[in-house]
Every structure is written in structure tokens, then in C-alpha cells.
Amino acid sequence: MLTVSEAAALLRDFDNVLILTHIRPDGDTVGCAAALCAGLRALGKTAYLLPNPGLTDTTRPYFAPYAAPPDFTPDKVVSTDIATLALLPENARAYGDRVDLAMDHHSSFERFGRANILRAEAAACGELLYDILRELGPVTPEIALPLYVAVSTDTGCFAYSNTTAETHRTAAALMETGIDYRAVNKVFFRTKTRKRMQLEGAMLSGCEFHDRGRVAVLSVPLSLMERFQATESDAEELSALGGQIQGVDCAVTMRELRPDVWKLSLRTGDRVNATRACGILGGGGHAAAAGCTVEAPWAEAKRRILDAVAQVAPDFSAD
């Protein structure tokens, strides 16, 4: 496993770099990739991001300036905020065995790169990228803005339990470059479409409670998305909703990606280790935020995740 200085030295030697982001890209993977691309270009390197079909309206503006043209052939491949090769988008699968440097912050990181760097204690991969980019040169506003997106989104605007003093120090340093962090906060944390609010209302009205009210299960079937004609942008970060319910310390969000294919997202407190629960079903992530995918009808998928939660929560109370 590389140190920050070793990772920076490796990147100094790279050129013609392609940067990969994960499926259903969030602010952390996009922000890290965009910042790294900007940092490499500042060194005179050729660098691009592999186009990701899952971009939303909120993440696309940070990605678009760095998207690779169709004819770009990389000499080096780097991944940001990707814990496992299973999280590569379809168009990135061809690069799975070609990742020269993998950078991540998930405890479930599978170290699939030829070289790897991990900071599992970091709230966001953006914290790690900030330290690496500082070694490469000045952190300009062009670099700092996407990094702020990375750090702020993976911490819920610094409200999640993964936020540390180091997270705040990183955010403060990024803000001091003069970026418009207020606009980021407004777009990501204080603005919702009407369709998004309709989705949230329907999810809450259909919410199920288990384990003496401590586990909440919220569902987003395809039919619900169709009813409100909601887009991926409307559904972004819906997994944060259940954790806002008083008394709930394990929120399960079930999002139907295709018929009977469910993306399960867990947001938990100290009592339930989300990574261990999702790991039982082949997923992973962090202790307080993890996910997995289950192919089964809704009732069966729900039973599997509740069984997994029961296995890692010793005081789980069956209904």
C-alpha cells in the first residue's frame, strides 16, 4: 500500500491518463476524478475522465470539462473512490485489469490496482486526494471546487457521523482558495425538485419499521419512479432519508434498478455495522454506510437484508 508521497511520485511519472469513476457516480467519485484531472493537467499532463452514463444533473457540470474523447487511448489508468471492480460502469470493464493506481477510502477496498492507496478512516476519498494533490503542486480553485463537492457530499454537508476534525480542516483549506462553496451547498443540500419531494413523500408513507422501530425499510420500485416521471437526478441520495426518522438507527433504502434487481443502501448508527451486513450479500462500504445488490422479488430482497442486519445486530428483535 502506497503512502501519499509515493502515490504523488507515481502520478508525476504518469501521462496520457484515463480516470475511472464508479457506477451511479456520486459527488465523491466525480469530485475526486475531476480534481485529479485538473491537477495532472496543471503539470502539463494529458488526462481525461472516462465518460460515465450514470451522471446526474448535479454531478455532470464537474465532470463534463474533463470527459475523454472517443478516440483517446490511455497509457495509464487511475480509479478514484472505487472499492471493487464490480462497481465499474460497463464501458470501464475493459480497463479492469489495467488500473495502474487505485485510490479509495472504503474498508472493503479490494486493492485491485497495480498500485493502491487507501485511507479507510477518511470520511471521503476527497480528503485523500487533497493530500496527494498538495504534493503535486498548488491546490488551485479549479482543483479545490470539485474536491469540496467530494468532501461535502460524502459527509452530508458535514452532518454525517463519518465527519472528523480532519474533514473540517480539509474543507476549510479548500474554502480558503476562494471557491464558491455556497453555490455547491445550495445545489446539493438545499434544493429539491418537486418530483424529488413527491418521491420522498411516497417513500415515507410506505415505510416499514422493524426491530422495535429501530430499522426502517424504504422502497423505490420502478413503478414509483414511473408514477412521478422521476429521473436519476430526482432520485440522487435518497438513501439519506430514512436516517432522519427519529428512533431509527438502521435505514434500508431499496431502489429497483431493473425488474427484480434491487440496490440496497444502508445508513446506520453504532449498533449496526453496515459493511458487515452488506458483506453478507456480496456488497461493502463503510461501517455506517454501505450497499449491495440483490436479484429477487421485493419481498425476498427485503427478507435477505433484514436477515443480514439481524446477523450483525446482536440485540435484533424479530417482528
Image (spheres, rainbow, N blue to C red):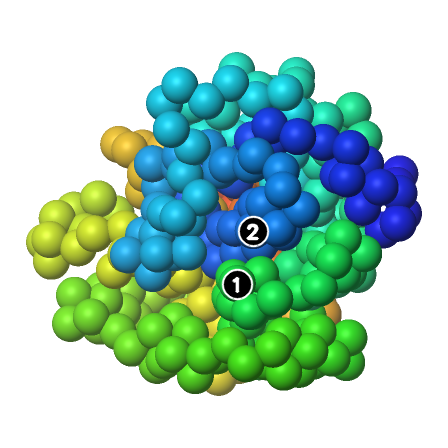
Q: Nearer the viewer, residue 85 or 241?
A: 85
Local SS, label 2: helix
Q: Which residue is mark 2?
A: 38
Asked whether the residues under the numbered discs 1 and 2 touch, taking CB atoms below 8 Å apart as contact, a structural biologist would say yes
Q: Residue at x 70, y 74 (%)?
A: 170
101 up-or-down from 278: above or below: above
Which residue: 12% across, 48% down?
226
Q: Is residue 116 above or below residue 150?
A: above
| In front of the other: 148 or 194 | 148
Q: Is residue 306 visible?
A: no
Q: Is residue 297 left or right of residue 14?
A: left
Task: Report x, y in % for residue 316.
Answer: 64, 62
**Which residue is labeled 1 in the image?**
142
Picture coordinates of residue 283, whole percent (x, y)? 60, 39
Q: Quadrant of residue 19?
A: top right
Q: Give the class, few, some or many, for how many residues have Cα within 10 Å of label 2's Cα (few <14, many ≥20).
A: many
In terms of image quadrants, where is residue 18?
top right
